[in-house]
Amino acid sequence: MNTKAMLAAAIVLTFLLSSAAIPAAYADDGDEGLPSKFDQRDLGIVTPPKYQNPWGTCWAFGGTGAAETAILTLLGTTWEESGLDLSERHTAYFGNNYIDEEVWETQAGEGLYWFSDDPNGPFDIGGTTYRFSQLFSSGAGPVSESDIPYRGNAGLSTLDALEDPELSEEALIIVEFGGKGDSVQGIIDGYTQEQRESAFRKWTETYGIEFPEGVTAFNFTAEEVVPGLTDYHIGKCTERNSYYKGDDWAVDRSERNYSRGYTMQDGNYLKNPLIISDGKVTGLDQGAMESMKRELLLGHGMVMSYRYDASGYNEETASSYQAGSMTSNHAVQIVGWDDDYPAENFAWHSKGEVLTPPGDGAWLCKNSWGSETYGYEINGETYYRQWGITDEEGKHTGFFWLSYYELALQRMESMTFTDTLFGEDGLIYMCYDYLPDAFAKSWTHEQEVRTANVFDTYDSKLEAVSVRTFGYDSEVTVRMYLDPKGDPDTGKLIFESTLTIPYAGIHVIYMDDYVPVREGHRVSVVLVERTTEGKYLAGAATMLGEKKARSEEARSYGVAVINEGESFAFEDGKWSDWKEEASKYEDETGFVIDNFSIKVFAIDDPHEDSGILLYAAAIAVIAAIAIGIVFIVRRSR
């Protein structure tokens, strides 16, 4: 079977597997529209909720869970059959980090940095739901949980640390005092009398600790409070333990581009369905709602962020809704919906009022705060968390309902994966964009604009390109040139494709056939994106630069590495090197901006005829031996 036929067969098979995974009850009803409710768990493609403690890595759990769902759909299997379990630690560490020479020598140093000397900093600065899709698209993972499990390198649990005489004070400082301080006595010495009274009241009334007679809020020292606090937290850990935050959680940088053979094919940035006026949700964009539902219906993985607020969480119905802030603080995976979920099941307590959403309907979400149904394991011991919707046995599942009208609903993203890009020796990524995208910057132009990346080649077969789009239903034209002479759109045209892409985001576009290239040459990929209104779009990932981040007291900042001759922009009829434009942008705004998100995928060894030559040589040798034997036999007669 030739390459085109194999690729066509793979695409058809993927479609059939995806279609087969959707029961008739959930299929699109044509003129009657989408079903009023849907649950991906019924398809077996949702992995169990996990436990993100001790870090604020919800975004990595939401994104990795969505990747698991997308890969299960790709493989046409279920979680129970496959046991698929991907590494959130790998995603979190490399998503909130920078790259070194081992990944890409010319881009070394690009990525995210944090204002902290803590080696565990990447796990403690949060993240956005866009970072994991960019991470996956740049060659990092996903890898199996068994390869890089969610724990520190020593495998210490919080309970282990509290019970270890050499670590117990350090552990207590982490779990009780937020890790801020070198000793308990030093922390106490820094308290005002008001803080002493508040702490002592919490320890005695809330924790129920009984201190020695005569110990009060006015005279307690570390010697009196440490034993009681340590015993209290040891007791809490026997109920709900976690791996120890004070352990070394760093991952060997050589593990960044390791993968199990799955490559993100589409990371779709979906439109926000909320219609907001004067800080209130006044309606829903039905087109955007339908897009989200169709992605779920197809078995694609989906993640989004919202604002968790205890004042808006109803434990009885496991439902969440808040209408007070448009700033999100938590990311979760979406796995279904129910148009008829009652608005009265939600309750937002604000300024003495109890408010409900303006309409029915909710998204079914998977959280990362543990569950009773599945539990979570710490060093062979299983722990359970009473959180979320209860199942038929009354156990908390870790799933919950989020109102359609949640004010801080943001950054809905769906993804698909492929396993057809890998060759026997893996996949070669030609990539310049490693900057996490906190603030995507795009420009709209009346006249044609083009963006391009130029790459050095290896002995390989080029098989696909990846581009980032910024519009919806954009017409996208991609052209690839071999050995451009000066401008990127010169040289030999070896690939051209024009197609309509429904969503903004990162997308893989397959070439018609493998294109063999040798080391020492160059290829350019030129992208043109045109909107349905006939305008042109271009953009790149942006982040706060170090100086601006310091002035805004941010926890992290980005560094972009753009070298001359890598990225180019075409505007007003001429090409310019993007390095110069990016430098101007940083000087003017304080934001760093990355190379264009245009990549080339290739596999090793383009010389298909080498195998044929070896085969032919072997046949020739065998034939020569046979002829020799015949000749000898004849002579012997």
Image (spheres, helix red, strand yellow):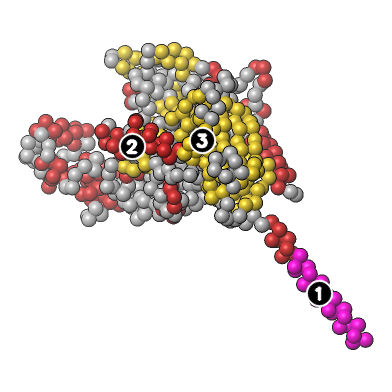
Q: Are marks 1 and 3 in contact (CB under 8 Å)?
A: no
- Reading the chain from its start, which is encountered first: label 2 or label 1? 2
Q: Nearer the viewer, residue 526 or 552?
A: 526
Question: Is 187 located above or below residue 194 in the figure?
Answer: below
Query: Is 370 one of the magenta-colored residues?
Result: no
Name which residue lies at 12% across and 37% down.
Answer: 191
Residue 152 lies left or right of residue 293; in this view the side is left
- The percent coordinates of residue 534 (x first, y second) are 58, 21
Question: Between marks 2 and 1, how big is the CA–CA gap?
Answer: 69 Å
Residue drawn at x 67%, y 20% is 30
* Residue under numbered circle 3: 575
Residue at the image point whose x is 6% and y is 39% from the top: 219
Label 1: state its secondary structure.
Answer: helix
Q: Which mark is residue 624?
A: 1
Residue 619 falls inside the magenta stretch: yes
Decide which of tag 1 and tag 3 comes sooner along the chain: 3
Q: CA distance from mark 3 to mark 2?
A: 26 Å
